[in-house]
Each structure stands twice: as structure tokens, then as C-alpha cells.
Image: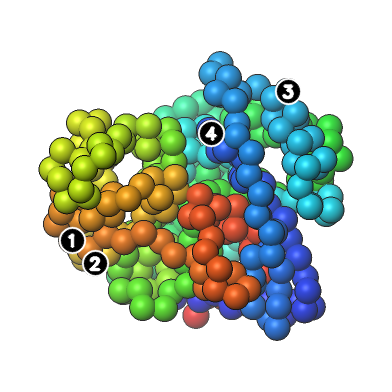
């Protein structure tokens, strides 16, 4: 099993992360206080729609990062970020246990099979997850992103004198947050981070990341009428598309792992929509709740769930994993 532990770092150790979404750029600063990660600062600004209209515009990102530097309370130069959703291909694969040097080669060859894109111009990386005793294999999270976007990200951060220490995977960022707030969670649960234009899902069993999936439906499909939250007509017909994708993902996991998901937790921009969790619970037929991040604040203050990815990126170096 893969267990997470807090690293032995000095009290006050602080990391900053910047999450570049399709509608907002979010900044999170997390500090170790008495050995526990606590959110110390949050900041967000809107992202112009044209930044992603024709692929990716690094000049707009540079301008946004300059705003962050000039208008936020961020003083640190070293930051962590990620490339989101449709611009990154992620796959969960299984590979026999082998030395790390051989594993790197095996992952690359497996990537050729499971990623439906030419790999010549892609940056490929992976994370070792848990050991699957049923198949005597290790689970691997594979990520691939266009090299041009990776270089553009690094270039934009460099332009404003931010040092980009890592470009992480969104799935790992979400996972880290829920390793810190696993209290009262069932054995198997899913998280759906529903953004404006896309949704990213992860499935967790006993603290282990088991599966991840993204799809291009987000909160722009939703519209709530000024009626009671129990109204059947409270949301637009486009909401059914999100429900369909969520249901498909949940069914696929159940068939693949031979175990049902016991709860769905929603985060992201949609989680602030009144009645949405109740609506999903009725449509999917089991428990759905909005993710709560107050455990990560200093004094139990409310934390907007749109910051969940940024917070998960910021704690990247504060927790470590060990395989038993």
C-alpha cells in the first residue's frame, strides 16, 4: 500500500503554487505550522478566454503572472504549477515490478500503446503509485504533454523571474489534498473537480490513487433557475451531459476494479452552485457532497474549493510516500 507521511521539514517551511485554469489563475501558499500544512494565502485573477482559443498563448500567461507578482502578497520566486486537462494525456497503467532504470524504459514503451498521439514532440513523465497484489504489478500514473506547451510555460514564468520548480499532474495535486483530509471518508470514493470547461476525476481507495479520467464538460453547461433546489427543472439540459460522463466514469471504475464507489465529492467552480450536489445525488443514485477544505486553514476558515488544485500543488514537497 502507498502511505503518505509529512516530511520532516522545518516549522514555517512555505511553498507557493500557481494553477492556470481556463477561466481563473489561482495562487496558493501553504506553510508548515507545527508540522502540519496550513493554507496561509490565496489569490485569484480572471483568465482571458483568448489565452486558450488557438492552443495556448504564452504572452497572456506572462501578463497574468506579472499581475500576480505586482498585486499579490507572494514574495517567493520558486513556484510549482501544472498543465491542465485537455492539454495533458494521463493514463493509469500496470507494469511488473522492476528496477527503476528498467521501469523508465518500460513506461516509455507502454506509453506508445496507450497514448493516441505521436510521442516525438511530447514530454513524458510518470509517478509510481501502489502495488497491485492481485496481479503482482505496480500501478503507474503516466502523463504526457506537448513539449511546446511545457517550454512555453517555463518561458512565461522565467519572463517574470519566477523559477518553475515543477510542472505537476492535476490528478496528483487532487490526490494529495485528500490524503490530508481523509477523516470520515469511505474506503472507496471519487473526486470530481468540475471546472468551467472541463472535469477531472480521481478515484481513491484506502488513500491510494486508483484511476483518473478527464472530460471536456464543465460548469458552463450548468444553469440554475431561480427555483427551489429540489426542482427537477433547476438545471439546464446541458447538465445531463455532465451527469452522463460522471455515471460512465463511475461504472467503468466499478467494472474494472470489481468494487463500487461509495461517495462522490465535487470540487471546483460548480461546487459553489446551490443545490448541485443534491441534484447529482438524485441523478446518480448515491451520496454526493461538496468538498470541504476548512481542515487545511489555520483557524477553520472557509476555503473556496476552486483552490483545491493549487493547494495540492503547494503541498507537493511537504508529504512523502513510502511503499509497504
| Residue 271 placement, left or right of 38 | left
10 Å crowding of disc 4: few (<14), some (14-19), many (20+): some
Is label 3 or label 4 in front? 4
Q: Which residue is mark 4?
A: 23
Residue 188 coordinates in the image, percent (x, y) = 30, 68
Q: Earlier in the sequence, mark 1 or mark 3?
A: 3
Per the model, the C-alpha gap separating discs 1 and 3 is 44 Å
Task: Identify the element where label 2 is drawn.
Answer: loop
Q: Which mark is residue 203?
A: none
Tell me which corner region of the image, top left, top right, bottom left or bottom right, holds residue 205: bottom left
Q: Which residue is mark 3?
A: 59
Q: Residue at x 36, y 78 (%)?
A: 184
> Furthest residue to the top?
54
Task: Identify the element where label 1 is drawn.
Answer: loop
Per the model, the C-alpha gap separating discs 2 and 1 is 7 Å
Residue 239 coordinates in the image, percent (x, y) = 25, 36
Q: Quick check: marks 1 and 4 in contact, CB under 8 Å?
A: no
| Residue 278 at least partly seen | yes
Q: Earlier in the sequence, mark 2 or mark 3?
A: 3
Q: Which residue is mark 1?
A: 286
Amino acid at each position: 500500500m502507498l502511505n503518505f507521511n509529512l516530511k520532516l521539514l522545518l516549522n514555517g517551511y512555505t511553498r507557493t503554487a500557481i494553477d492556470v485554469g481556463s477561466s481563473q489563475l489561482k495562487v496558493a501558499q501553504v506553510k508548515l505550522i507545527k508540522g502540519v500544512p496550513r493554507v496561509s494565502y490565496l489569490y485569484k485573477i480572471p483568465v482571458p478566454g483568448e489565452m486558450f482559443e488557438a492552443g495556448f498563448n504564452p504572452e497572456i500567461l506572462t501578463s497574468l503572472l506579472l499581475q500576480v507578482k505586482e498585486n499579490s502578497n507572494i514574495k517567493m520566486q520558486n513556484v510549482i504549477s501544472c498543465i491542465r486537462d485537455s492539454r495533458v494525456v494521463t493514463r493509469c497503467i500496470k507494469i511488473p515490478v522492476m528496477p527503476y532504470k528498467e521501469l523508465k524504459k518500460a513506461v516509455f514503451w507502454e506509453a506508445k500503446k496507450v497514448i493516441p498521439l505521436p510521442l516525438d514532440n511530447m514530454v513524458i513523465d510518470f509517478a509510481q503509485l501502489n502495488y497491485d497484489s492481485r496481479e503482482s504489478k505496480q500501478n503507474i500514473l503516466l502523463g504526457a504533454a506537448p513539449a511546446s506547451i511545457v517550454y512555453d510555460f517555463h518561458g512565461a514564468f522565467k519572463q517574470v523571474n519566477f523559477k518553475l520548480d515543477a510542472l505537476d499532474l492535476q490528478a496528483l495535486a487532487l490526490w494529495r489534498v485528500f490524503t490530508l483530509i481523509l477523516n470520515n471518508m469511505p474506503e472507496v470514493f471519487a473526486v470530481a473537480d468540475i471546472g468551467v470547461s472541463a472535469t477531472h476525476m480521481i478515484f481513491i481507495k484506502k488513500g491510494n490513487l486508483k484511476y483518473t479520467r478527464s472530460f471536456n464538460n464543465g460548469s458552463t453547461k450548468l444553469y440554475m433557475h431561480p427555483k427551489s433546489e429540489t426542482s427537477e427543472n433547476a438545471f439546464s439540459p446541458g447538465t445531463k451531459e455532465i451527469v452522463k460522463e460522471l455515471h460512465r466514469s463511475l461504472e467503468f471504475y466499478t467494472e474494472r476494479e470489481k468494487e463500487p464507489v461509495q461517495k462522490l465529492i465535487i470540487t471546483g467552480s460548480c461546487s459553489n452552485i446551490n443545490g448541485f450536489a443534491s441534484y447529482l445525488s438524485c441523478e446518480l443514485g448515491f451520496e454526493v457532497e461538496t468538498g470541504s477544505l476548512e481542515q487545511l486553514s489555520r483557524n477553520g476558515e472557509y476555503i473556496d474549493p476552486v483552490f483545491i488544485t493549487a493547494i495540492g500543488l503547494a503541498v507537493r514537497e511537504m508529504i512523502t510516500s513510502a511503499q509497504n
